[in-house]
Image (cartoon, rainbow, N blue to C red):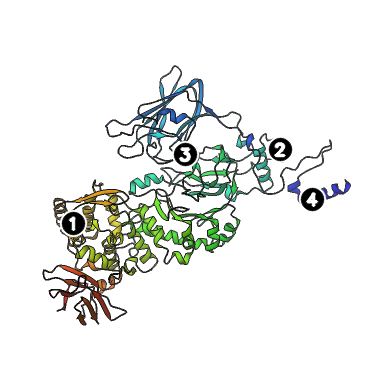
Amino acid sequence: MKALRIIVYMVCLLFPLSCGEKESPDGPEVPPLVPEGEYVPVGKPDIKDDIRVKVLSGTASSWQQGENIEKSFDGSYETLYHSSWDNSAGGYFPVTLTYSFSKGTDIDYLVYHPRKSGSNGNFRETEIHYKTRGKEWSAAGKYDFKGSGHPSKVDFRTTLKDVESIRFTVWSGAGDGQGFASCSEMEFYKVNPDKFDPLSLFTDRACSALRPGVTDEDIRSCGSEFFRNMAAYMKAGRYPTEFRVQEYSAYPYPEVVARDLKISPYSFMDGATGIFSPGGEDMVVLVDGLGNRQASVYVQNLDRPGGDGFHGRSFPLSDGVNQIKSMDKGLLYVVFQSDDYLTANPVKVHFAGGRVNGLFDLRRHKDTDWQRLLGAAEYSFFDVVGEYSHLTFPTSRFRAHTPDGAALVRVFDSFVRAEQELMGLYRYGRTFPNRMRFIVIYTSYMYATSYYTAYNDSTLPQLCDVLSLTTGSCWGPAHEVGHCNQTRPGLKWLGTTEVTNNIMSEYVQTTILRQPSRLQTEDMGEGLPNRYAKAWRDILAAGAPHSTEGDVFCKLVPFWQLQLYFGEVLGQTPELREDKGGFYPDVFEYVRTSPDLGTAGEQQTEFVLTCSKASGHNLLDFFTKWGFLTPVDASIDDYGSGRITVTESRIEEIRQRVEALGLPKPDSPIEYITDNNKGLFKTRPEVIPGSVSVSSSGTVTLTDWKNVVVFEVRDADGGLVFASEGKLAPSSKAVFTIPGGWNPSYRILAVSATGERTEVWP
């Protein structure tokens, strides 16, 4: 026993903070204030929950059969109340929901839970009234829930005494047409008077630091084991604050940004925490500085081998102690959104529960921190946060393929920034801080939707490798981000879902990364060396409507040609302009600020006018050749069948409106510009003839021709039969075969960048 006492004494001399024990003159030893080892939350069951108030009954002014108001207080987040699906009649709003309680009920706050999936009916503008026994209705306040899919806490600030009923008057909600009203649960609470007061030991309600002068005895006398344990670690200087205690800035509502810009909403999970829940544990979250603003913690588990793990669960936050029961497995994010996000003070959030996983944030970490942070990660997924992008991929993928996480996220940042510049967001002061989210999935290949873009785990060896990403693998992410940025409907009408997003892909590929253009390099066979040649054959030579072309990359050609000519040749592109303006920035702005047209035919033909205005040129000839102004009435399959109709009267209307602008026509045949020959459109040299031979089978061989944009084959009536790109370098010879063979009436013409045509044959 004496030897044991000597050992204990020596340990206490070496580790006084850990032991902290002393001999009492009255007898028993005082236990150590701080246990050995790293901080582990203990004593969660001793935290008092607020008291949920039972709803006795409810009524609604509108409901859908089977989705009546009782579904909003049945204790299940899987069911929902929904107003009538038929919202076509006038006077649909307001929709009123009234909840009644037992006699003598006091209520301090309520929590509105939107539906778990989808957005139809998520509340927007709403008024809340309450009625106490024997009195008339009183106003509790006006709220705009912004159509958000996250729970919202409404704190009445002073307790509502003896409440008989609470009524929601919903003036607007998300959804088609006029919108709808819906919710999964409406919960009402009374604050538990026995809850721990954080200010008894800590400097703020987030419990971020001990009050000056707090002693060991003060901590030992704390009635809560959970807070006593946390305070002890802080007193000893051993509490891990790096990720557990952080300030989170407000962000705009992505849904509001999306409506204003006519795009898909960007991420709502910009508040990455570096904390994860292993699942099935209670979580204590401490908050300070929120006031009457709305914030929540979102848990996301991407570990869904059979599906998409994006959709998680959200829990509302308030100042002080928040206890979340049986937190799901996943990474945690603070969702803090506000209309005044530019001036709003940050909110301090302390995750006293959960586990530290860490993250890499380009704004707060050095490049050299990457290996330290990634090496310490304990969870199977890891957050990498850039200025414009946010990656959440498997930790193992980063460890295997990403030696420099800062370099990787800067590449993704460059994609997002470039697309936003081309959209004119910088030129017109429409930037916003929400990031583009990139997540892993285990089903499908790649896709984009509201709030995120998704990439199959099998693609990540390429997407997590900087060299691969900046060469052949760049198209996928640029394409998916392009989907989110499609400005609709003026730049995304029926038949263009997989077309106009690729304006962005081409821009990132060629302009930002200086890689060869996909349109230029993909051999189509049949004597067609690229998509330009195929598009010239299938649309220009055929005189076909643009809308009925089945090859989405051929449909892309005229959109990209406008960027090549007005952007690169004439310098009207963000890359070349200090103000980040140009042709496409002006096109996007015009689409954003113009009324939306109702039909695909109107939208397609209106684009002719839009581009003419943005370019300062009459583009009727260009769009006529590309079939935008060709009459059509056809069914189009574009993620569902629809119909596009372009009438002669509509074509004539557009022609008159463009002509009325009094703009000059381009002095170059821009329907023939390619990535390969765009240099000729800058210098505009004369054609230098060479030699030509034509076989009876229709094979044409041209040697030593210079400065030719394209070789045209035309019939006796002057109609275009075939077109072949004229630039021969590095070879001095060009060979192409005329479809259907040679006809003696055919003529071959060499076209220059000025549109001058030189007779080649006969």
Query: Which residue was labeled with disc 4?
Result: 11
* Label 1: element kind: loop
Query: Which residue was labeled with disc 1?
Result: 629
Q: Residue at x 34, y 69 (%)?
A: 521
The amino acid marked with disc number 2 is Arg
Query: Which residue was labeled with disc 3?
Result: 294
Reading the chain from its start, which is encountered first: label 3 or label 4?
4
Depicted 494 relative to depicted 532: above or below: above
The amino acid marked with disc number 4 is Val
Pointers 3 and 1 in contact (C-beta within 8 Å): no
Pointers 3 and 2 in contact (C-beta within 8 Å): no
The amino acid marked with disc number 3 is Gln
Pointers 1 and 4 in contact (C-beta within 8 Å): no
Reading the chain from its start, which is encountered first: label 1 or label 4?
4
The amino acid marked with disc number 1 is Leu
**Disc 3 to disc 4, C-alpha distance:** 49 Å
Q: Would you call the spot at circle 4 few (<14 residues within 10 Å), some (14-19), or many (20 or more)?
A: few
* Residue 28: % across, % down: 82, 37
Q: Is residue 142 visible?
A: yes
Q: Considering depth in this image, is 483 or 577 the residue closer to the camera?
A: 483
* Label 4: element kind: helix
